[in-house]
Image (cartoon, rainbow, N blue to C red):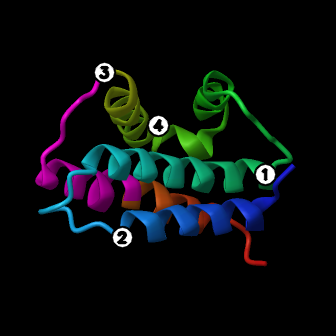
Amino acid sequence: MPDRRNHLRQAGHNEKFINHFELDSTIFLDWVVTGIFYSALHYVEAYLATKDIHLRKHKARDAYFQKLSDLKRIYRDYRTLKDDSEGARYDLQQFQPQEVHQLFTQEFNTIKNHILRLLPTP
């Protein structure tokens, strides 16, 4: 199972992917939204790994947002990213650059910063 460090590395890797796109001109906003979600997911997984919790199913991970008080306050942001990612992948939802920018600067950054504050220093 990946540990905290591996999940943080993957989250950073996904962020690098996201940052390769110019939001105002890319035709791949759906992939950017998906990348934002999966980066957030790996930040959450990094935290869960510190609790020796390793999950593969989205539904099981979602349940931990209610079980762990440290995660409750970011569930709305996480759910927004998850829903938009699913919308992009399965419902062919279209996004505007400003919407994607908001997902990154608000929901994603809220999750990332919250998780990084919770993680023990190595």
Secondary structure type for disc 2? loop
Q: Which of 39 and 63 lies nearest the eye of the viewer? A: 39
Return the disc, 4 or 2, that comes first in the chain's sequence: 2
Q: CA–CA distance between discs 3 and 4?
A: 22 Å
Q: CA–CA distance between discs 4 and 2?
A: 24 Å
**Vertical placement of residue 26 versus 55, above or below:** below
Q: Which residues are magenta?
A: 91-108
**Vertical placement of residue 7 versus 96, above or below:** below
What is the residue that sits farthest to the bottom in this orientation? 122
Question: Which residue is labeled 4 in the image?
Answer: 75
Question: Which residue is labeled 2 in the image?
Answer: 19
Question: Which residue is labeled 3 in the image?
Answer: 91
Q: Which marked residue is nearer to the observer: mark 3 or mark 1?
A: 3
Q: Horizontal and vertical percent for residue 22?
A: 22, 68
User: Magenta region, mostly helix, strand or loop?
Assistant: helix
Identity of the amino acid at label 3?
Asp
Identity of the amino acid at label 1?
Ala
Q: Horizontal and vertical percent for residue 112?
A: 49, 61
Q: Which marked residue is nearer to the observer: mark 3 or mark 4?
A: 3
- Residue 49 shows which numbered tag? 1
- Check disc 2: other Cα within 10 Å, few if <14, some if 14-19, many if 20+: few
Q: Quadrant of residue 65?
A: top right
Secondary structure type for disc 1? helix
Q: Horizontal and vertical percent for residue 25?
A: 13, 62
Q: Quadrant of residue 9?
A: bottom right
Q: Horizontal and vertical percent for residue 54?
A: 80, 41
